[in-house]
Image (cartoon, helix red, strand yellow):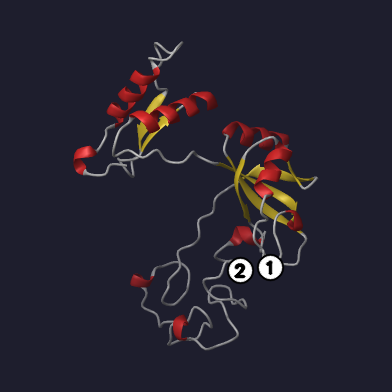
Amino acid sequence: MAESENEKKSAGSIRAAIEKEIRTMDNHTHWRCRAVTVSPRDPNRIRIACRDEAEHQLVKKVAEAKTGRGVRVLRDELYPIKVNSVKRATVLDGNHDVLAGAAEAMSEENDTTVAKIKWLSTKEAAKPYGSMVVYLTKGTDARRLLADGYFHVGGESGTTRVFEHRPRPVQCYNCQEIGHKAFQCEKTQKCAKCATEGHHHSRCNQEVPKCVPCGGPHESLSKNCWKLYPPRHE
């Protein structure tokens, strides 16, 4: 990312710098970037496509060293896969947090590198099994595990499927309902804690919460709301 207008780098200049450096290496005399693209949403975000993992690591190393001041190399892309029928106790602790060392253990069991884990099912539910998404560092590993159909966790095997990201619905922080934002809202304010009209949740003294979107016994911003977070309740 550029630090100032005068330091902005173009996709062409970044490509030239990387190709020049790599061509000085043995067996890379005629090397060329596979592709260099610019994000249509952010012209300062430039992506270099690589042919395989080895080339990816080489390009990343050169980019970090040779693209100059004003450019920041972003973290590697992660590859999510969904895993169903996972034993809760092998992933979450008593506070419903992911167990320390869980990612390392799953990496070893599945011959991959798990960068992070996210539990999808309701954490507070009593069900012993649920779903999670694991984020892998290699696309080849994600494709392999999806093709195999299984992901091993604590000696048991969950089933794999493509993870379909479902963005959280738009929610109004005035009336707490779904489908519009606060600046568009013409309704009476409702408390996000107790669902009562006329006051903000920061001034709420009610001990029993109630959700406006689903009517459940939790606050309207809670991840326990099945309307706001449907994947967590599968």
Does 2 sit above or below residue 10? below
Residue under pointer 2: 224
Distance (Cα) linking label 1 and label 2: 8 Å
| x, y percent for residue 134 | 62, 46
Residue 164 pos. (x, y %): 57, 48
Proximity of marks 1 and 2: CB atoms separated by less than 8 Å:
yes
- Residue 226 in the image, given as x and y percentages of width and height: 60, 66
Instruction: Judge from the rendering whether residue 61 lies leftward or rightward of residue 85; answer left or right.
Output: left
Q: Is residue 69 left or right of residue 101?
A: left
Q: Name the kind of residue labelled 1 in the image.
A: Glu
Looking at the rendered structure, the kind of residue marked 2 is: Asn
**Whether residue 8 can be seen here:** yes
On screen, residue 16 versus residue 136, left or right, reads left
Q: Is residue 151 above or below residue 230?
A: above
Q: How many residues crowd mark 2 within 10 Å: few (<14), some (14–19), many (20+)?
A: many
Describe the element under mark 1 as helix, strand or loop.
loop
- In depth, the one of 32 and 95 nearer the eye is 95
- For the C terminus, the image quarter is bottom right
SS under mark 2 = loop
> Mark 1 = which residue?
124
Residue 228, given in percent of the width and then of the height, sits at: 54, 65
Q: Residue at x 58, y 34 (%)?
A: 138
Mark 1 or mark 2, whichever is nearer to me: 1
Camera-nearest residue between 213 and 206:
206
Please give the name of the residue rendered at 71% of the width and 45% of the height, measured from the top-left corner.
Answer: 105
Q: In the rendered view of the protein, which quadrant contains the N terminus? A: top left
